[in-house]
Image (cartoon, rainbow, N blue to C red):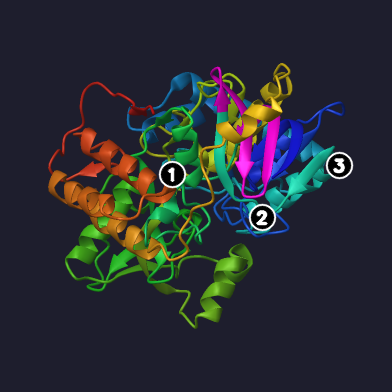
Amino acid sequence: MEKEFFDSVIIGRGLAGLSSAIESKENKNTALFFLEKEKEPKANSFNAQGGIAAAINSNDSVEKHFNDTIKAGAGLCNQKIVKILVEKGKEKILELIDLGFEFDKENGVSFGLEAGHSEKRILHSKGDNIGRELTSFYLKLAKEKNIHFFPEKKLNELIIQKDSGKAVVFDDLLVEFNSLIFASGGYSSLYSKNTNKGKTKGEVNSIALKAGIELMDLEFEQFHPTTIKETNFLLSETLRGEGAFLVNDLNEKFMEKISGKDLATRDVVSVKVTEEIEKKRKVFLDCTKIKNFEERFPSIYLKLKEMKLNPELIEIEPAAHYSIGGIKIDLNSRTNLKNVFAAGECSCSGVHGANRLASNSLLEAVVFGSIAGKNAMQTKKNEKIKTEKINELIKTKNSFNSNFDFPLLQKLMWNYCGIKRNENELQKGLTKIKKMEKNNYTFLAEKIIESALNRKETRGTHFRTDFSEIKEKAEHTVIRK
């Protein structure tokens, strides 16, 4: 096995990882590892359509953005973290503009509205291509730094000594470090219906937990209410912000009597859409009121054209979209291991509480990726592993079975730990998954279901049909090795 050493190692190929990487100093040696077969990073952040939220509109304020985030989070947000997000987020957006990043304009920067926001504060770039444009911009900045890029590396293990991270082990490479940043995405692909194109399966969360890193709030998976039926293709919430609305095949606007109507938070809309489908009704997104659809939503329009679908009335269904839970971090993006950090969707700081406010995810990646990168650069020198100790420290071999029935796992997670949950179904799902092959996917799936079983209430994205009330005291679920 080959060996390498870097001052800072970043695991991830999206916006959070790139945001961390650009904080690299000239005298530091930084490496960015992609876990998939891609020469360029095309993570979920690359595919993001909706936009990035920031209170830079003259009618807006960081206080309003703070309050909207807290409200959406259903009592579980860490207020100190939210304050950092909205304040540093505004600074980051203004900094991006100064650096030359181009947001869409119409008599100045134009702003969109999404669910849960009290003001128009969603910024876009080239219509619904904000993720692609931001990721490409950050990639360009990263390539100007002293950064080594390693595509297509499968992570097997994190080596820990004396409560410190020492090295990461890939199939053919052992990499020692002074600091490590996990920025590897969430676990939404554990569900059969998901918007993540199979890229985020949560294996890094499993590896982190097995190494002694705490995870938090795994039961909170955010389901997006509007994807094109049987395709998992996301239809941005911004469509509803621009006038689209939900209707069933009886032509009933079933969201009309709900607080927030079609722009209620995602947890509410996902449940209501699911209830319509349970009644054997078809659900559509009516886009007839949207002006300049092709210009405003170019990637969505092209997809609809490719599928030969009517852009005015699109049959939809919910799908797993964003993992709110993940690697537990503090205000400085630190995990419980002093030289290991995390940022973006793989992390959990409490910033989203029990339900993420729309378009806060890209902002989180930019803000906390930067915080993780800056703090990682200040990490003290790590003692290198003695050569004779390396082989005995490596415990995990590349033992993944290519015949593992991953689609079955996804089906079980969707059927038994989906949008609407109860103890009986969760227990059934857990029993079935425990009979499957043991690997990082089934390990994490079990932890998600166990967390869902232990939260005996309905809060945010965690909807229990057998515990419909929300508890007075909001508590996080922390999982330890």
> Measuring 87% from the left and 29% from the top, which residue is drawn there?
26
Return the residue at label 3.
Answer: 144
Mark sitting earlier along the chain (2/1): 2
Residue 152 numbered tag: 2
Quadrant housing residue 144? top right
User: Looking at the image, is 31 positioned above or below residue 419?
Assistant: above
Q: Quick one: SS at disc 3? A: loop
Indicate which label's residue lies in the foreground, 2 or 3.
2
Return the residue at label 1.
Answer: 323
Q: Quick one: SS at disc 1? A: strand
* Amino acid beneath label 3: Glu
Question: Would you say residue 24 is visible in this rendering?
Answer: yes
Question: Which percent across, then down, holds residue 357?
Answer: 45, 40
Q: CA distance from mark 1 to mark 3?
A: 31 Å
Quadrant housing residue 474? top left
Mark sitting earlier along the chain (1/3): 3
Indicate which label's residue lies in the foreground, 2 or 1.
2
Question: Which percent across, then down, holds residue 33?
Answer: 68, 45
> Is residue 180 found inside the magenta-colored segment of the image?
yes
Q: CA distance from mark 2 to mark 3?
A: 22 Å
Other-residue count near label 2 (Cα within 10 Å), few / some / many at <14 / 14–19 / ≥20:
few
* Amino acid beneath label 2: Glu
Other-residue count near label 3 (Cα within 10 Å), few / some / many at <14 / 14–19 / ≥20:
few
Query: Do callouts 2 and 3 mark residues in contact (Cβ within 8 Å)?
Result: no
On-image quarter of the N terminus:
top right
Q: 42 or 71, which lies in front?
A: 42
Question: Which percent across, then down, holds residue 381?
Answer: 73, 18
> Measuring 36% from the left and 50% from the top, which residue is drawn there?
438
Residue 342 numbered tag: none
